[in-house]
């Protein structure tokens, strides 16, 4: 380890570059937490914004050129739904990454992706999502979502019977009421 606690391999400092799509939406504490967790294992985190980087380019051009190691995109996500992160990107023929669609998981992955969003229950959605991740990670190896950040629900202490669900479109409001 160097004086800053970051390890080196073959003379190169171990550092991950994090491309942050919307830096203004990211709380500093998130970046500090990520950096601290990586530093515990001797890896530095260097965050970069979406502006042109070395060689220029938009965020998606930088994604396609692989000018970073990790990508942080802050937008509404479906907590605990492994398919949610995948739906924001797709791979065009030739390997070019674009926003929206399934992450190039082939016909089987596409079919499972469609099934998860029409599953009759949360349990069924979880089973199909697990099958989808099997295809994406084991069969196709195209993109692996590492995590999603939870969406906090702010509600008055008078709100009763509210149960947040993983898939936003499946949120039920029929039993929610306000106490006197």
Image (spheres, rainbow, N blue to C red):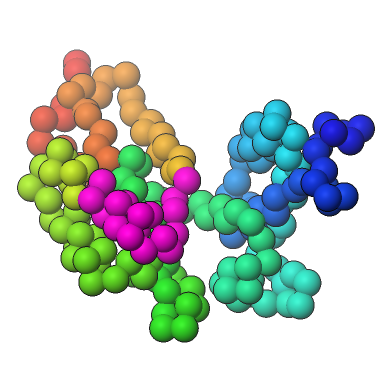
Q: The magenta stretch spans which residues?
A: 129-146
The quadrant of the image that shows the N terminus is: top right
Front residue (pair 96, 170): 96
Front residue (pair 30, 45): 45
Residue 21 percent across, percent down from the top left:
59, 59
For residue 83, say whether it is visible: no
The quadrant of the image that shows the C terminus is: top left
Q: Decide if residue 7 is on the left or right side of residue 132.
A: right
Residue 108 percent across, percent down from the top left:
22, 66
Residue 117, quarter of the rendered image = bottom left
Residue 67 percent across, percent down from the top left:
68, 66
Residue 176, quarter of the rendered image = top left
Task: Report the residue at 41% width, 83% height from top.
Answer: 93
Front residue (pair 177, 35): 35
Please identify the residue farthest to the bottom as the structure is shown: 94
Residue 48, quarter of the rendered image = bottom right
Query: Is residue 134 found inside the magenta-colored segment of the image?
Result: yes
Whether 92 is drawn above or below 69: the answer is below
Query: Is residue 87 found inside the magenta-colored segment of the image?
Result: no
């Amino acid at each position: 380890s160097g004086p800053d606690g970051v390890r080196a391999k073959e003379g190169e400092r171990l550092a991950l570059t994090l491309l942050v799509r919307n830096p203004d939406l990211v709380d500093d504490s998130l970046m500090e937490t990520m950096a601290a967790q990586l530093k515990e294992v001797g890896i530095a985190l260097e965050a970069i914004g979406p502006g042109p980087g070395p060689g220029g380019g938009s965020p998606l051009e930088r994604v396609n050129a692989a000018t970073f190691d990790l990508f942080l995109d802050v937008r509404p996500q479906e907590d605990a739904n492994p398919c949610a992160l995948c739906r924001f990107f797709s791979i065009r023929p030739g390997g070019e990454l674009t926003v929206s669609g399934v992450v190039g998981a082939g016909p089987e992955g596409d079919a499972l992706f469609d099934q998860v969003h029409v599953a009759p229950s949360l349990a069924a959605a979880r089973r199909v999502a697990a099958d989808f991740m099997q295809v994406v990670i084991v069969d196709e190896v195209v993109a692996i979502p590492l995590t999603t950040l939870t969406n906090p629900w702010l509600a008055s202490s008078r709100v009763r019977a509210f149960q947040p669900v993983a898939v936003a479109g499946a949120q039920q409001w029929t039993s929610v009421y306000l106490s006197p």
